[in-house]
Image (cartoon, rainbow, N blue to C red):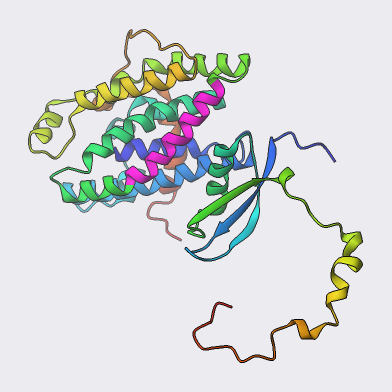
Amino acid sequence: MATDSQLATWEVFMQSKPGANYIHAGSVHAADKQMALQNARDTYTRRGEGTSIWVVPTDAITASNPDDNDMFFDPANDKVYRHPTFYVMPEGAKAI
Amino acid sequence: MGDDALIQSYRLSEWCSNAPILEEDLALTNFALDMTGRAQAMLSYAGQVEGKGRTDDDLAYKRKERDFYNHLIMELPNGDFAYTIARLFFTSTFEFFFFNQLQNSADTTLAAIAAKTIKEVRYHNAHAIDWVLRLGDGTEESHNKIQKAVNELWMFTGELFETEEVDALLRDQNIAVDMPVIADKWKEHVAQVLSEATLTIPESGYMQSGSNKGIHTEHLGHILTEMQYLQRAYPEATW
């Protein structure tokens, strides 16, 4: 594959409405923070998808290695008691 | 101003699939869409004021070259990326001050269009300025390209501030804007950005003119040939 000659990549996180979680939207190319923000705006908010944007240099993200999935995630599979399923949720706590 | 938006939109949309990076492609065509919206609002209103039942589409697709009043700078071919950016910088700075003042127009429709437009134009202007700084203060090649573009476009900037008798009449009724004020603000702002971008401000020399009499460069005719083709070949076509 040809190397990417279009500047560094930045990961874009968007908030759909105030108070909501920031969700990964995708990535953009940019030379600096300001350009990353503008490119994210132009690429991902054209149809009113967001009210706030974060951009993070892709380099700054540390990802787990798929080879480690056994070690990382399997031990949680059989520990049902970790889920708070034995409680009655109070009314009004809808966002939990 | 409706024609300005329409023709500039046409030029920016020519960057579709041709911009240096995908993100810039989206940005420029996004701006083109903003401008098409503005053209639609302006031309619909112009048709309404005229009172002959012409719609925005009639005005866009059925007028001849000499009946278009867009500024010459809008119709010039895109050139390279630096040239397009320099133009966008000049025009969006003009539009920023223009619409900022038009928001106070005694004509409520124009004031409302201006209030909506100013938000879009502020962003176009910020985007253009960032690029002027980046190119001007970038490599030797980018610096030379943007300087060349600024020099070549300079003679088309005087026309932006020309006024006719009718403009003065509208200004006295607080409908139109005060061009000399806008011209001063424009010059000050442009000079500031260019010097920050380490670029030289061209000497004021001969300025092109003609668009407020409907006299254009040879480029507008080509734009209209393509833009109006469908309507001319298949009148009243719809989908």
Question: What is the span of residues highlighted in magenta in the rendered image?
Answer: B117-135
- For residue B152, above or below residue B12: above
Q: Position of residue B129 (x, y in %)?
A: 46, 29
For the point 32% across and 38% down, which residue is it? B3
For the point 37% across and 18% down, which residue is it? B191
Which image quadrant: the N terminus of chain B? top left
Instruction: Tell me, yes or no, if residue B138 can be seen here.
Output: yes
- For residue B195, above or below residue A27: above
Given residues B113 and B208, the one toward you in this image is B113
Q: Position of residue B5 (x, y in %)?
A: 36, 39
Q: Position of residue B152 (x, y in %)?
A: 45, 15
Instruction: Tell me, yes or no, if residue B224 can be seen here.
Output: no
User: Which image quadrant is residue B186 in?
Assistant: top left
- For residue B151, above or below residue B31: above
Q: Is A45 in the magenta?
A: no
Given residues B229 and B1, the one toward you in this image is B1
For the point 33% across and 45% down, which residue is it? B117
Given residues B193 and A85, the one toward you in this image is A85
User: Which image quadrant is residue A74 in?
Assistant: bottom right
